[in-house]
Amino acid sequence: MTYHATPPKQTTAKTLPTYAARDLTEHGDLAQIVLGEQVYTLRITRAGKLILTK
C-alpha cells in the first residue's frame, strides 16, 4: 500500500484592484489608459465586451 503526504495548504492570492468598466469610461463607451509613454483606448462594444487597443 502506498501513502502520500498531505499537500501543503495554499495561501490565497492577494486581492487585485478591481474597477468597473463603466466607471473607467464615465458611463460612456471609451476611455484612455496611459502606461508609461503609451496611450491605450478601452472600448466597450455593443455586445458588452471589452477591447483594448494601442
Image (spheres, grey):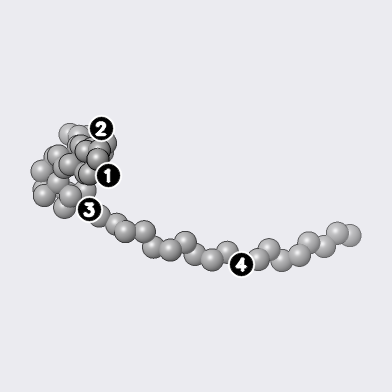
Question: Please, what is the three-letter code of the amino acid marked with disc 2?
Answer: Lys
Mark earlier in primary sequence (3, 1): 3
Residue depicted at x 78% and y 61%? 4
Q: What element carries label 2?
A: loop
At label 3, counting other C-alpha atoms closer than 10 Å, the crowd grade (few under 14, some 14-19, many 20 or more) is few
Query: Alpha-carbon neighbours of circle 4 within 10 Å: few (<14), some, or many (≥20)?
Result: few
Find disc 1 in the rendering and name its residue.
36
Query: Does the CB distance between marks 4 and 1 fall below 8 Å?
Result: no
Spatial CA distance of label 4 from label 1 is 38 Å
Seen in the image, is 2 located left or right of residue 45?
Answer: right
Is tag 2's residue or tag 3's residue first in the polypeptide sequence?
3
Question: Which label lies toward us, 3 or 1?
Answer: 1
Which residue position is annotated with label 4? 9
Q: Can residue 48 be seen in this view?
A: no
Q: Which of marks 1 and 2 is in front?
A: 1
In the rendered structure, find residue 4 and report the number of the disc placed on it: none
**Can you tell which mark lies on residue 20?**
3
Residue under label 2: 54
Q: Nearer the viewer, mark 2 or mark 3?
A: 2
Report the amino acid beneath label 4: Lys
Q: Quadrant of residue 54?
A: top left
The residues tagged by marks 1 and 2 sit, at their Cα atoms, a distance apart of 13 Å
Are the residues tagged 2 and 3 within 8 Å (C-beta)? Answer: no
Task: Classify mark 1: helix, strand or loop.
Answer: loop
Which amino acid type is marked by label 3? Ala
Q: Say above or below: 51 vs 35.
A: above
